[in-house]
């Protein structure tokens, strides 16, 4: 892997890239909310060596720059960020002979779903981990979300940053929240921490802590899922978010044109807990896609 940076319209995002062998697929990994590209650290050495890899920290996450001004990272702008990354000349995806596969965990999986639906000719397959299409809410909750989000923004503006006495305390806190071992979380947390005179603090933009001001309606979500025509592997955890094992999730699954569902033991970050099984699922899925074409 080669560490690099990719220029977007207004900031630089940190990335890691590996060039594929001729004709081999390129996997584009997208991490979850308040995570960073090290979320996939344990998967990389287990993947086939001929696969191309692109990983990057979302803006405001990890080692990427923060968006300027009073900006709160609305979901739809992540699509623009991904579009700029995929179309940047340094990655040589334009005219790429191998397949392009989006692999997204949580937020990354939601972005991948919307992008694959919007650019079906650019994406050959998609893998989501603890994500099943866009997040949606009933239309009648829109004003309640406005109030909650705006109040959270006001609190964040007035709140002082949080500092830890040591990186170990930050790691232990994150492990208790995610229900993942310290060892499994170490690469992600190490990339996500910054040491300063006041102590240790998270690198990610504090404004990420405010809830989204707006979420799409169920009808919008259904329309997007139905527009995804590439093969999809959706991995969920046995102890992950209950929404992915609900009646609503079962209905959503029927909207996909080509869906393979898989389940792994673990919590929302099951790919950290089961890296070998995760890679086996991804590799088998991608290999079958290659065989079909």
Image (spheres, rainbow, N blue to C red):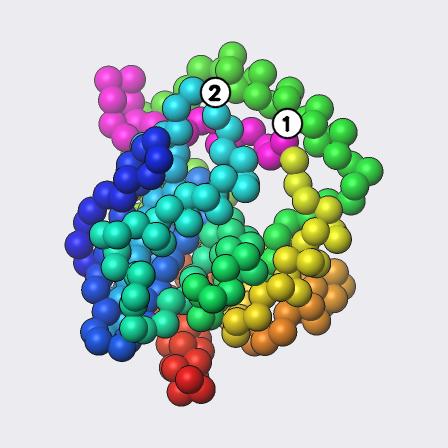
Q: Residue at x 52, y 19 (%)?
A: 156
The region drawn magenta spans 192-213
Residue highlighted by disc 2: 70
The mark that comes first in sequence, 2 or 1, is 2
- Residue 136, given in percent of the width and then of the height, sits at 69, 48
Q: Residue furthest front?
A: 95
Rendered image quadrant of residue 245? bottom right
Check the picture and name the quadrant holding the N terminus: bottom left
- Residue 87, given in percent of the width and then of the height, sits at 34, 52
Query: Helix or strand or loop: what does disc 1 sit on?
Result: helix
Q: Residue at x 56, y 29 (%)?
A: 210
**Label 2 neighbourhood size at 10 Å, few (<14), some (14-19), many (20+)?**
few
Residue 198 is inside the magenta segment: yes
Instruction: From the viewer's side, name the closer residue of 263 and 147.
Output: 147
Residue 47 in view of the camera: no
- Residue 227, given in percent of the width and then of the height, sits at 62, 64
Left/right of residue 281 with respect to residue 225 in the rendered view: left
State whether residue 213 is above or below residue 221.
above
Check the picture and name the quadrant holding the C terminus: bottom left
What's the mark number on residue 149? Answer: 1
Residue 3 is inside the magenta segment: no
Q: Residue furthest right?
A: 140
């Amino acid at each position: 892997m080669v560490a690099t940076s990719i220029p977007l319209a207004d900031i630089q995002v940190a990335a890691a890239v590996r060039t594929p062998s001729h004709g081999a697929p390129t996997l584009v990994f997208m991490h979850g909310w308040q995570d960073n590209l090290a979320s996939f650290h344990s998967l990389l050495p287990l993947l086939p060596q001929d696969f191309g890899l692109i990983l990057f920290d979302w803006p405001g996450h990890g080692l990427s720059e923060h968006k300027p001004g009073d900006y709160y990272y609305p979901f739809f702008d992540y699509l623009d960020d991904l579009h700029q990354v995929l179309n940047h000349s340094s990655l040589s995806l334009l005219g790429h002979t191998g397949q392009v596969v989006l692999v997204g965990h949580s937020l990354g999986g939601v972005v991948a779903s919307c992008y694959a639906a919007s650019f079906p000719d650019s994406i050959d397959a998609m893998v989501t981990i603890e994500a099943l299409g866009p997040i949606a809410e009933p239309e009648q909750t829109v004003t309640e979300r406005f109030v909650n989000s705006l109040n959270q923004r006001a609190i964040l503006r007035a709140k002082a940053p949080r500092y830890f006495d040591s990186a170990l305390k930050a790691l232990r806190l994150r492990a208790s929240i995610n229900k993942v071992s310290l060892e499994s979380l170490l690469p992600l947390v190490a990339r996500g921490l910054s040491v300063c005179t006041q102590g240790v603090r998270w690198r990610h933009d504090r404004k990420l802590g405010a809830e989204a001001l707006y979420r799409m309606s169920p009808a919008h979500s259904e329309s997007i899922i139905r527009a995804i025509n590439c093969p999809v592997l959706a991995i969920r955890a046995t102890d992950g978010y209950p929404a992915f094992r609900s009646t609503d999730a079962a209905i959503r699954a029927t909207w996909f044109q080509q869906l393979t569902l898989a389940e792994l033991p673990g919590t929302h970050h099951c790919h950290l807990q089961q890296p070998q099984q995760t890679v086996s699922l991804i590799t088998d899925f991608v290999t079958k896609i290659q065989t079909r074409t």
